[in-house]
Image (tube, rainbow, N blue to C red):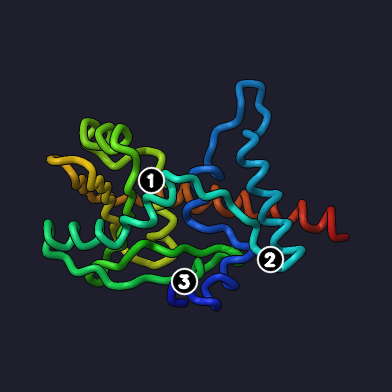
Amino acid sequence: MIPANTDEWLTARIGHLGASMMPTVMLKPNRDGSEKAAREKLRKQIVAERMTGYAVDHFVSPAMQHGLDWEDQAKLEYEAETGNLVSPAGWFYHPTLEYAGATPDGLIDVDGVLECKCPTTVTHLDYVMAGVVPEEYRPQMAFQILCTGRKYADFVSFDPRLKTKKLFIRRFEPTAEYLAEVQLAAESFLKEVDLMFKLIDG
């Protein structure tokens, strides 16, 4: 494991498929069978990073910055609610795929990883009312499990602006079939990246 937010961590991720990219990788095609624009853009970004050796800059919106600012507090709230201690995480290379890895938000005991979100209040309340791990984050959490070799992921949503229902926690234990589906999607996408890289770079 490479500790998060270090120069080595930043370098390790360049040109790699990360867990947070998996929801985009697994987007279904358009009705006409064409690829979603976001998926195509992601492939081009990874190729660009491999060709330049530099990370592609990503826009950070105020909502995204809010999430970053409150992540540590979310972990503390999770620890207080569950009694589980959260250990620092870092970059885990995928055990079988080259150019792939994941950085969970934290590690729990010996078998778990943590995924924290601090979204808008409306989004947080959507999670609370649905009462399940949001579908859009399941590919990301499954890929974290594949990269770390752990068994489950705890999803945490935290909104400090609320007077009640500030914290939402659900455990995600993907089936072997779902893990295989995510694994195959990552393999296929990385083959597409390799092909594009070879076509451009010769």
Out of 202 and 71, give the one closest to the viewer: 71
- Horizontally, residue 162 falls left or right of residue 22, namely left
- Local crowd size for mark 1, using a 10 Å CA cut-off: few (<14), some (14–19), many (≥20): many
Residue placed at 19% from the left, 47% from the top? Answer: 167
Residue placed at 21% from the left, 36% from the top? Answer: 128
Q: Position of residue 189 (x, y in %)?
A: 62, 49
Out of 86 and 154, give the one closest to the viewer: 86
Counting residues from the start of the chain, the first of labels 1 and 3 encountered is 3
Task: Please give the residue where the numbered disc 3 appears in the rendered image.
Answer: 5
Badge 1 amino acid? Arg
Badge 2 amino acid? Tyr
Q: Secondary structure at mark 2?
A: loop
Q: Which mark is residue 197?
A: none
**Residue 40 placement: quadrant:** top right
- Local crowd size for mark 2, using a 10 Å CA cut-off: few (<14), some (14–19), many (≥20): some
Task: Please give the residue where the numbered disc 1 appears in the rendered image.
Answer: 138
Q: Taking 11 as reference, is 140 above or below it?
A: above
Q: Position of residue 59 (x, y in %)?
A: 57, 49
Q: CA distance from mark 2 to mark 1?
A: 28 Å
Q: Secondary structure at mark 3?
A: loop
Badge 3 amino acid? Asn
Task: Please give the residue where the numbered disc 2 appears in the rendered image.
Answer: 54
Residue placed at 49% from the left, 45% from the top? Answer: 61
Q: How many marks?
A: 3
- Local crowd size for mark 3, using a 10 Å CA cut-off: few (<14), some (14–19), many (≥20): few
- Horizontally, residue 195 falls left or right of residue 114, namely right
- Horizontally, residue 8 falls left or right of residue 163, namely right
Q: Taking 165 as reference, is 18 above or below it?
A: below
Q: CA distance from mark 1 to mark 3?
A: 24 Å
